[in-house]
Image: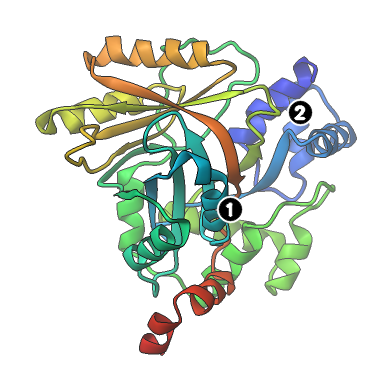
């Protein structure tokens, strides 16, 4: 990647324009023509630096139930257990981490499904020794934005892209059949061509302006977080992802979590439940080119907040990394296979 590639990647992670000719608009501040932006974007996808360009929706705002889950798996069985977990289509991220809770994954299920029953079934199928459901009690921030240029300081601040207020706004609204159609289209990978939205709009029976208006409405109501490029972190040079877990006194969680979320290098920040063997109530995810870079960021957070009791959990193996596909039949098929009694009971 040259400097222009890196600057292009920075922009399309945060500001992909919803216009008829987005690649033309992306190139203008970089001094690039539409054809060159298309060529560079295609090349970055071909070498698996860009994973997908699509809408990023908030899972819970759409009515799905989701959680981070930590499992303790016997070391000799972790590969087998991970593959079993991966079979669930709602599992989007699955990592081995350097802790006695050694398998961590995120899972989402449709509004009609039972998240706890699903996790219990996965616990049985995977042969886990202990399973902890790390529900989100409060969302402080969500939104990955990797600094490809290396110009951002470890203690740089930024306004969170999406937080609890946005999610709460969505709770006051509901999705129409048209909304669901728009979601199904915008969640798919965008073609790299001059007018990539035209076919989507046609399938919905509208024009591009109608599609953009519908997308803007979903964003204003809190369902759509952003439209952006998602990168393969490791291929993009970010070899380490550090999950900082912080033991924060209950009365300080709101203040501390809000301050942690203001760090530009923090992509995710949540309050999660504690357990007798797990005193860590605030989670902050950072990405770096090395463990040392992540540690520098976490150290800066510790100094800024005064929280000294924390762990840095790093992924030692990536088993799965994908995106949830909403309003599709795959999750129902998994339940029919692995939870037939529940399917029969719910009709």
- State the residue in front, 35 or 297: 297
Percent of width and height locating residue 29: 72, 24
Q: Please determine whether, in this image, residue 137 is positioned above or below residue 325.
A: above
Q: Position of residue 26 (x, y in %)?
A: 73, 34
SS for callout 1: helix
Q: Is residue 10 visible?
A: yes
Task: Give the residue number, with chain letter if any, for mark 2.
Answer: 28
Above or below: residue 208 compared with residue 277: below
Q: Nearer the viewer, residue 304 or 17?
A: 304
Q: Quadrant of the N terminus?
A: top right
Q: Is residue 309 left or right of residue 70?
A: left
Q: Earlier in the sequence, mark 2 or mark 1?
A: 2
Quick one: which residue is furthest to the left in this view?
A: 251
Q: Residue at x 49, y 10 (%)?
A: 153
Q: Position of residue 247 (x, y in %)?
A: 21, 27
Residue in view at x 51 percent, y 46 percent: 77
| Mark 2 neighbour density, 10 Å: few (under 14) some (14–19) many (20 or more) | few
Residue 234 position by quadrant? top right
Q: Nearer the viewer, residue 156 or 309?
A: 309
Label 2 vs label 1: CA separation?
45 Å
Residue at 70% across, 60% down: 208
Using the image, tell me which numbered label, if any, was put on residue 9. none
Q: Quadrant of residue 139?
A: top left
Dot 1, crowdedness within 10 Å: few (<14), some or many (≥20)?
A: some
Q: For this rendering, which residue is in front, 201 or 246?
A: 246
Q: Is residue 79 left or right of residue 29?
A: left
- From where the camera sits, is residue 56 visible? no
Colouring rule applied to residues: rainbow
Which residue carries the number 1 mark? 83
Q: Secondary structure at mark 2?
A: helix
Question: Please, is residue 175 above or below residue 308 in the view?
Answer: below
**Total labels drawn:** 2
């Amino acid at each position: 990647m040259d400097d222009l590639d890196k600057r292009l990647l920075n922009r399309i992670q945060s500001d992909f324009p919803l216009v008829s000719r987005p690649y033309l608009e992306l190139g203008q501040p970089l001094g690039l023509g539409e054809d060159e932006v298309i060529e560079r974007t295609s090349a970055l996808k071909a070498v698996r630096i860009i994973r997908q360009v699509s809408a990023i929706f908030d899972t819970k705002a759409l009515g799905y139930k989701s959680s981070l889950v930590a499992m303790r798996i016997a070391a000799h069985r972790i590969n087998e257990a991970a593959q079993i977990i991966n079979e669930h289509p709602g599992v989007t991220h699955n990592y081995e981490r350097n802790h006695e809770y050694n398998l961590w994954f995120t899972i989402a299920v449709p509004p009609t499904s039972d998240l706890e029953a699903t996790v219990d079934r996965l616990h049985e199928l995977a042969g886990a020794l202990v399973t902890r459901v790390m529900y989100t009690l409060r969302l402080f921030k969500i939104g990955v934005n990797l600094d490809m240029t290396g110009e951002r300081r470890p203690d740089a601040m930024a306004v969170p892209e999406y937080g609890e207020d946005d999610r709460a706004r969505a709770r006051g609204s509901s999705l129409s059949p048209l909304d669901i159609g728009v979601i199904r289209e915008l969640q798919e990978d965008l073609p790299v061509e001059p007018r990539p939205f035209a076919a989507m709009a046609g399938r919905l029976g509208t024009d591009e302006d109608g599609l953009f208006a519908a997308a803007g409405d979903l964003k204003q109501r809190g369902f759509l977080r952003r439209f952006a490029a998602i990168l393969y972190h490791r291929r993009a040079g970010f070899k380490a992802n550090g999950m900082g877990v912080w033991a924060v006194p209950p009365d300080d969680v709101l203040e501390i979590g809000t301050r942690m979320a203001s760090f530009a290098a923090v992509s995710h920040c949540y309050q999660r439940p504690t357990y007798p063997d797990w005193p860590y109530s605030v989670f902050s995810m950072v990405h770096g080119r090395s463990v040392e870079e992540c540690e520098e960021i976490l150290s800066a957070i510790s100094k800024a907040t005064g929280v000294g009791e924390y762990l840095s959990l790093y992924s030692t193996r990536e088993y799965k990394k994908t995106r949830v596909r909403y309003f599709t039949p795959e999750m129902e098929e998994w339940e029919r296979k692995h939870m037939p009694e529940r399917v029969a009971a719910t009709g």
